[in-house]
Image (tube, grey):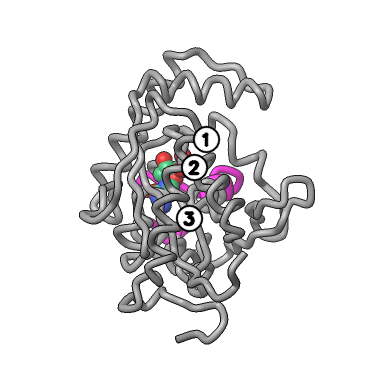
Amino acid sequence: MNLDAPKITIAIDGYSGCGKSTTAKGVARRLNYLYIDSGSMYRAVTLYFLNNNIPFDKENREMLNALEDIHITFEINPQTGLHEVVLNGERVETLIRTPKVAESVSPVSIHPPVRHAMVRLQQELGKGGGIVMDGRDIGTVVFPNAELKVFMSADVKVRALRRQAELAENGIHLSLEDILSNLENRDTIDSSRAEGPLKKAIEAREIDTSKITVEAQIDTVCHWAEEIIQMGGNPTSPDFKRTKNNV
Ligand code: DC
């Protein structure tokens, strides 16, 4: 690996369940970049709200107080080498993937104080470049200067089938109808909220993953990334970093 190569920022946004995380993980592994799943942070906040009976139907004082008590960090899982979310010192990667959290996370993510806290943390994690982050507002709000922005979509039925298989691997068995309605519901809430809605950044490159393999998705993003890296990244971007000389 060329250590003089600029370390770029890669923002991957898109609909629920279209393969963003799998793609982002694969890209980060190949480029030796940090991978951060921003959805896991919103899920961790949701888990805290549910466990502590914090109402989230509308913005309220309890919610604001709770946000002060929520500390989200990441730790490497030695088995996978991936950074996993830690909520107030507890590893919650599995607990945040339950249907209850999936059902509540979009309503929680609407609230500007929740979003502001998460965006601040995400920007802090990415400030050195060399990161792949996936979510809904990464290219538009979190890293508006990212050198590479990708927007992913896929047919909703394909997404539901994939999500069903993924959940089954973790011992959670849900009907296709339930998964479809959760995905559609989340897409609607995520795309229509006032703050940081799911939206394609103007300059984002698009991938429809309905008919292509995960390997092809990773190849495509890595190819784009390598083109940009070879061009020297985007020196006008504040996120642009050179690992060696920092110029
Ligand atoms: O990526 P995911 O499906 O695990 O994300 C769960 C939810 O978190 C998603 O439905 C909306 C919210 N989210 C968000 O609002 N902004 C992000 N950058 C990432 C996720």
Q: Secondary structure at mark 1?
A: helix
Residue of label 2: 218
Q: Residues within 10 Å of mark 2 (few under 14, many from 20)?
A: some
Rendered image: mark on residue 215? 1
Measured in 3D between alpha carbons, the distance from the residue under mark 2 to the one under mark 1, in whole angstroms, is 5 Å
Q: Secondary structure at mark 3?
A: strand
**Amino acid identity at mark 2:** Ile
Label 2 within 8 A of ligand 1 by Cβ: no
Residue drawn 66% across the image and 24% down it:
169
194 in relation to 2, above or below: above
* Residue occupying the point 45% across, 66% down: 8
Circle nearer the viewer, 3 or 1: 1
Viewer-side residue, 110 vs 208: 208
Q: Earlier in the sequence, mark 3 or mark 1?
A: 3
* Dot 3 crowding, Cα within 10 Å, few <14, some 14–19, many 20+: many
| Magenta region | 45-63
- 143 is within the stretch colored magenta: no
Question: Is 90 left or right of 98, judged from the image as shown?
Answer: right
- Does residue 45 appear left or right of residue 185 in this picture? right
* Residue 108, placed above or below residue 87: above
Secondary structure found at label 2 = helix
Q: Is residue 56 magenta?
A: yes
Closer to the eye: label 3 or 2: 2
Residue 242: where, in percent of width, then height? Answer: 49, 78
